[in-house]
Image (cartoon, grey):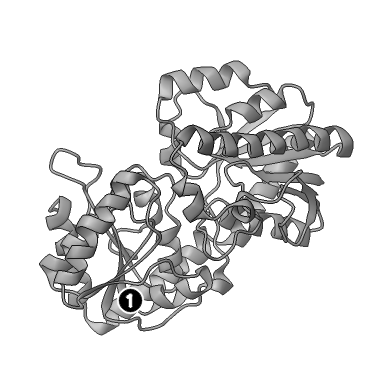
Amino acid sequence: MKILLANINDLQPIPPPEDLIRADTYVSVPLALGLKKMGHDVFFLCPKDSKIGVKKIFTSTKSLHSIISLEEFLGISNSNLRTEMILSLQFDLYLNLIEACKREKFDLVHIHTNNPLAELIISKKIKTPFFFTLHGICLYPELESRIKRLFSKKENYFISISDYQRKTYPGMKFLDTVYNGLQLEKFPFVERGGERMFFAGRLKKNKGVKEAVEIAQKTAKRLEITGSVSTDPADRAYFVDDLMKEIKKSKGMISYRGLVRRREMAAFYGQSRLTLFPVQWEEPFGLVMTESMATGTPVVGFARGSVPEVIKDGKTGFIVNPSAKDIRGNWIIKKTGIAGMIEAVNRIYDLPEKDYLAMRENCRRRVEENFSAEKMVNSYESLYRQIVRN
């Protein structure tokens, strides 16, 4: 099959540089490479400074990353100007998408995006089947779904990255759920792990970094934090005014390592006793969970979004209900909120060595069987064949 892939969210080079965290490209890049390995004719629509190892259809410019640094971009006080820069680059990408589809006669186009409204409008002008993998959640379900159905066409196919994600798009017809896959060779299994707790993710309130710090303080366990500071002004203020003060007060019990290069993340996961995932929003798929479990490190997380689909309660970590008023399931840990997270943490630290090592093996096996890049590529390829054949 002749296949075109594109990341609409991402105005960065493909693959992105190590100092940028782009979860959707961690999925689309191994997908493109895997499809090429299977013998498909794979193209990727991307900025001119991209180096992905498939055929490239370049946009008219280099990436936003090469035009302006993140610090300079955030330093632009006029938010309208920032928006205009992004929209201009996206508009260029859309023009090249239309031209490529008319010129190359693809069997299908596969778009990775948070909100595919513009791409849906474009797809109505092109006969080629369009696949959309959605990487966000629907914030205004009734209105958004109605608009998307209005602009959609018969040859559009929507893929969810978790079953939970579908609930946020009422009325949207999904072809299937395909979980995000991990390149297992980049996250080798570590048999024994370490003694610290670990938190990875963008340092913004909805990721739960505040809760992770509170858990560390109340359990008196060492906590290592990695991640970039959010671009949101309120989150940046929290980082400077509150989080760093708590870290300094901890006298070494809590440490912040900054943004760690992706190739170094496996060591941080693997040398931890457990990974905290006290997420405060309905995350459609948390790569942190699968990355941690791939190295053997169990995860303790709130039962929000995709968490109950990824963690096997009691086998690869523990799932905790967010509060007494927000019960999502009958989990092993009966306490809720921070108290429940603390109980789960203590349970893992108190496990006999034999049981803890078995939990680590369970973690690796679960990722191998359910969340590998190979399984993801095979799932997508099967869906492609189903649609193209029909």
Q: Position of residue 379 (x, y in %)?
A: 63, 50
Residue 358 appearing in the image:
yes
Q: Secondary structure at mark 1?
A: strand
Q: Using the image, determine if residue 352 lies above or below residue 182.
A: below
Residue 42 appearing in the image:
no
Q: Nearer the viewer, residue 220 or 108?
A: 220
* Residue occupying the point 71% across, 46% down: 5
Total marks in image: 1
Q: Position of residue 324 (x, y in %)?
A: 12, 43
* Residue occupying the point 29% across, 45% down: 234
Q: Quadrant of residue 366?
A: bottom left
Neighbour tally class for label 1: few under 14, some 14-19, many 20 plus, Cα within 10 Å: many
Q: Quadrant of residue 260?
A: bottom left
Q: Nearer the viewer, residue 294 or 17?
A: 17
Q: Nearer the viewer, residue 127 or 39?
A: 127
The answer to whether residue 216 is left or right of residue 10 is left
Q: Which residue is mark 1?
A: 272
Please, what is the three-letter code of the amino acid marked with disc 1? Ser
Q: Position of residue 244 (x, y in %)?
A: 23, 64
* Residue occupying the point 71% across, 36% down: 92
Q: Quadrant of the C terminus?
A: top right
Q: Position of residue 131 (x, y in %)?
A: 66, 37
